[in-house]
């Protein structure tokens, strides 16, 4: 996988209304006053209008969380339609699904879920309602590209599913034999690109003249460091000082290499910013993390575009029964550049790798995917 985060739901670099998780390169792209929409992949080869008919599938979605994710996407589109049109409305995909229909779909989701709060019976979980009110664009996976990156798909009808999360991990204030990897804040931007991740882990920043040019926010194990830099946000529990919410800030300039299957070999290192836990901002972000699990996907925003309603169809690995999951495409990362064969599913706040592995066991490795949009009424 990639990486780093936050979702579109959690960054200090984008408006609080969106807060993305995979921030890899997103800060620079979002701050550019970019109004052009550069064509990347031939998306028309991989996305086709197709019938959408549900029968016995169980719809596994948290309606209230889905509503909030839809609101996030709508607010983001409204604020950044002019400056970030390259990820809001990619030029190639706009010919398949217009931005106007994306907005109408998100607005419809917000509306019907709000109406259904009164009864507690949510139409978004009713297969007949979805059949009646939504049309579908089938996702044909880019199998050739997947194979070039050593990813084997069962067929071109199924995309790969991966999972990411915000970890609640243990840390220390002082370096020790076990907690020997630093999550640093930068005090001097001039040293940001001087060392690789491996050199930093080996202690390159723990010697003069660099001691005052960085601040260790926490000392963690190597596995926690990899998890934190992959996901981009981590909640560190310190025995003497409560918890600290850390978010990726700046990287060392090394690109993510999809060819490396062992994330420890990636040369990219991320410096962090301490958000704390008691500030209003930190509490706000933690609450949003908890409220967005299982309804957010990270994917190729520059080719597909933000705010798409994604439907996944597969057999639930635990029950072996047909299932449909709904979520909003609202996040991205380096692993998703020109990647039309994969989505990353946000699992929320987890207590560690063991909990994440249990979540992953309950999800399929591959799934059929489509983009749903509100069916337009035919003029009479």
Image (tube, grey):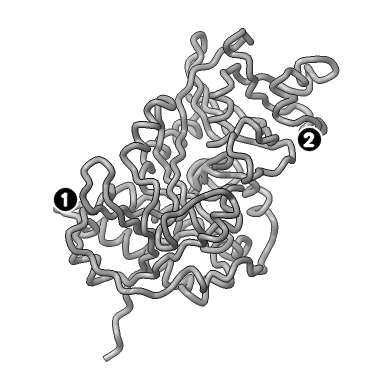
Please report the residue visible at 60 percent of the width from the left and 54 percent of the height from the top. Answer: 148
Which of the 4 image quarters holds residue 51?
A: bottom left
Gap in Å between the C-alphas at discs 2 and 1?
52 Å
First in sequence, mark 2 or 1: give its number: 1
108 vs 273: above or below? below
Closer to the camera, 9 or 276? Answer: 9
Pointer 2: what residue?
Answer: 193
Q: Secondary structure at mark 1?
A: loop
The answer to whether residue 309 is visible is no
Query: In the figure, is residue 60 to the left or right of 36?
Result: left
Which residue lies most toward the right here? 209
In the rendering, at what x and y percent does residue 110 appear? 32, 58
The answer to whether residue 378 is visible is yes
Pointer 1: what residue?
Answer: 120
167 vs 22: above or below? above
Please report the residue visible at 48 percent of the width from the left and 32 percent of the height from the top. Answer: 280
């Amino acid at each position: 996988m990639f990486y780093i985060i936050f979702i579109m739901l959690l960054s200090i670099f984008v408006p609080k209304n969106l807060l993305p998780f995979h921030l890899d390169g997103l800060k620079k792209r979002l701050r550019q006053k970019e109004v052009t929409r550069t064509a990347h992949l031939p998306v028309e080869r991989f996305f086709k209008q197709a019938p959408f008919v549900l029968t016995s599938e169980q719809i596994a979605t948290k309606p209230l969380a889905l509503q909030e994710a839809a609101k996030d996407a709508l607010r983001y589109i409204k604020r950044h339609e002019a400056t970030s049109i390259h990820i809001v409305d990619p030029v190639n995909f706009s010919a398949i699904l217009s931005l106007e229909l994306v907005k109408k779909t998100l607005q419809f989701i917000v509306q019907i879920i709000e109406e259904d709060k009164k009864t507690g019976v949510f139409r978004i979980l009713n297969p007949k309602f979805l059949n009646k009110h939504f049309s579908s664009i089938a996702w044909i996976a880019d199998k050739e590209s997947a194979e070039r990156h050593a990813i084997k798909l069962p067929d071109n009808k199924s995309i790969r599913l991966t999972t990411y999360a915000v970890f609640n991990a243990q840390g220390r204030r002082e370096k020790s034999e076990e907690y020997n990897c630093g999550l640093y804040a930068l005090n001097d931007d001039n040293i940001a690109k001087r060392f690789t991740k491996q050199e930093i882990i080996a202690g390159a920043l723990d010697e003069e003249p660099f001691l005052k040019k960085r601040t260790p926010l926490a000392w963690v194990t190597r596995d926690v460091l990899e998890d934190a830099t992959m996901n981009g946000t981590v909640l560190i529990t310190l025995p003497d000082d409560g918890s600290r919410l850390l978010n990726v800030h700046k990287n060392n300039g090394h690109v993510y290499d999809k060819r490396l299957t062992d994330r420890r070999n990636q040369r990219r290192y991320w410096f962090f910013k301490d958000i704390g836990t008691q500030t209003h901002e930190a509490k706000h972000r933690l609450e949003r993390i908890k409220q967005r699990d299982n309804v957010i996907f990270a994917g190729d925003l520059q080719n597909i575009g933000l705010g798409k309603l994604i439907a996944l169809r597969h057999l639930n690995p635990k029950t072996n029964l047909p299932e449909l999951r709904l979520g909003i495409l609202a996040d991205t990362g380096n692993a998703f550049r020109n990647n039309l064969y994969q989505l990353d599913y946000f699992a929320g706040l987890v207590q560690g790798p063991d909990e994440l592995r249990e979540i992953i066991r309950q999800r399929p490795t591959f799934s059929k995917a489509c983009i749903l949009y509100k069916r337009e009424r035919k003029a009479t």
